Amino acid sequence: MSVPDAPVTGAHLEAPEPTDGGDRPSRLDPAIAARLRRTPDGLVAAVVRQHDSGEVLMVAWMDDEALHRTLTTGRATYWSRSRREYWVKGATSGHHQYVRSVALDCDGDAVLVSVDQVGAACHTGHRSCFFTQLPVTSSGEVTS
């Protein structure tokens, strides 16, 4: 089992104004920030996939500053809701995510982060967080 990624302690104190509407300052481009539709706690969902295969690896959360850091450093950076700190994927586990592209969805409430994943994406040690299959009993066909 791998070691979970640790937050970047105190990282949220380094960014200057303006803010994303919450208590965390951000340097995100105002044109990008204006397109985001955030949760009440200032977050957007980040769906993460392997850039070349399209494999969905994980879902995490970003605030404006995490998105800014992801876009400008090329390293996937997220906001930990439980620890209330930023964390860079792979900072402690060595299972890095090198960002290839980021796309905003049509509603502005999620981003698709395409990465080159090194090692496991899931804190359990699995390649993807989506390793538990659920039974589907319907064929999905529409009948009239």
Image (cartoon, rainbow, N blue to C red):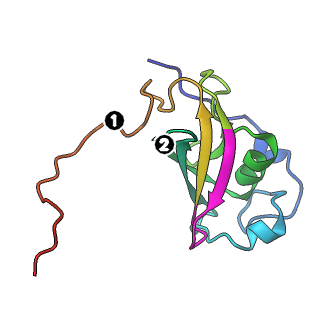
Kindly state the secondary structure of the residue where label 1 is placed: loop
Of pointers 1 and 2, the one earlier in the residue sequence? 2
Q: Quadrant of residue 51?
A: top right
Task: Reply yes or no: does residue 109 show up in magenta.
Answer: yes
Give the residues drawn in magenta, as a range.
99-110
Of 81 and 36, which appears nearest the observer? 36
The three-letter amino acid code for the residue at tag 2 is Met
Q: Amino acid at mark 1?
A: Phe
Residue drawn at x 73%, y 34% is 9
Q: In the displayed structure, would residue 11 be above or below residue 5?
A: below
x and y percent of residue 120 in the render? 50, 26
Which of the 4 quarters of the picture holds residue 32?
bottom right
Q: Residue at x 75, y 40 (%)?
A: 74
For the N terminus, the image quarter is top left
Say which residue appears at 49% left-offset and 19% top-offset.
2
Label for residue 131? 1
Report the residue marked by disc 2.
Answer: 58
Residue extending farthest top: 1
Left or right position of 26 against 124: right
